[in-house]
Amino acid sequence: MDEAITPEWVPALLPALPLPCGDGLGPTDRFQIAVRPVDEIWRLLFVTASMGGMGGSGTQAAYGRLWAWRSIAGLSGAPADASVEEVERRARQSTWFHFEADTDWFHNDIGSDYGIAALSPDRRRLAVPAATDTD
């Protein structure tokens, strides 16, 4: 971002971004977003990585933790060589969001898709991964 934004702006900004998961979202379509603690986001990423998708085997516990940790580090904007303490500090200072929407991309089956947005501590970077697992 050219300027810092507040977390309160994210719910209005996110649907306006050119994201494939938001394609076709109309002004009256459901778009749900909520601030979540980093611990909840970590659990979501851990479950995704360790268990895999529906019918998948994932990477199991240890590698699931590693991939969830790397995801949290990257989403919070930590440098690749950041220490554990630096990643944790950045992650706790970031503002985390969980979102879902009624678009063709989201199938809204429990556990099959979600979106995350992470607003960095300096409030100038918004990282947005979205995951789906459908046939």
Image: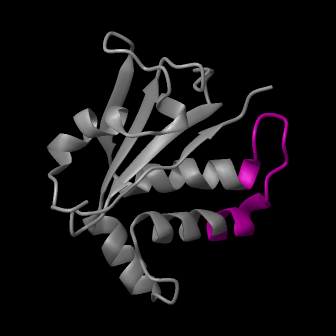
Front residue (pair 29, 99) = 29
* Image point (35%, 44%), residue name: 97
* Image point (31%, 62%), residue name: 125
The relative height of residue 62 versus residue 87 in the rendered view (above or below) is: above
Residue 55 falls in image quadrant: top right
Residue 25 lies in the magenta-colored region = no
Q: Quadrant of the N terminus?
A: bottom left
Boundaries of the magenta span: 50-66
Chosen colour scheme: one colour
Left or right position of 57 against 117: right
* Image point (33%, 38%), residue name: 14
Q: Quadrant of the C terminus?
A: top right
Front residue (pair 30, 38) = 30
- Could you tell me residue 70's position as x and y percent? 57, 70
- Could you tell me residue 51's position as x and y percent? 74, 48
- Could you tell me residue 121's position as x and y percent? 24, 68
Left or right position of 49 against 114: right
- Could you tell me residue 53's position as x and y percent? 75, 40
Residue 49 falls in image quadrant: bottom right
Front residue (pair 53, 14) = 14
Q: How many marks?
A: 0
The relative height of residue 118 versus residue 135 in the rendered view (above or below) is: below
Left or right position of 32 against 9: right
* Image point (45%, 87%), residue name: 82
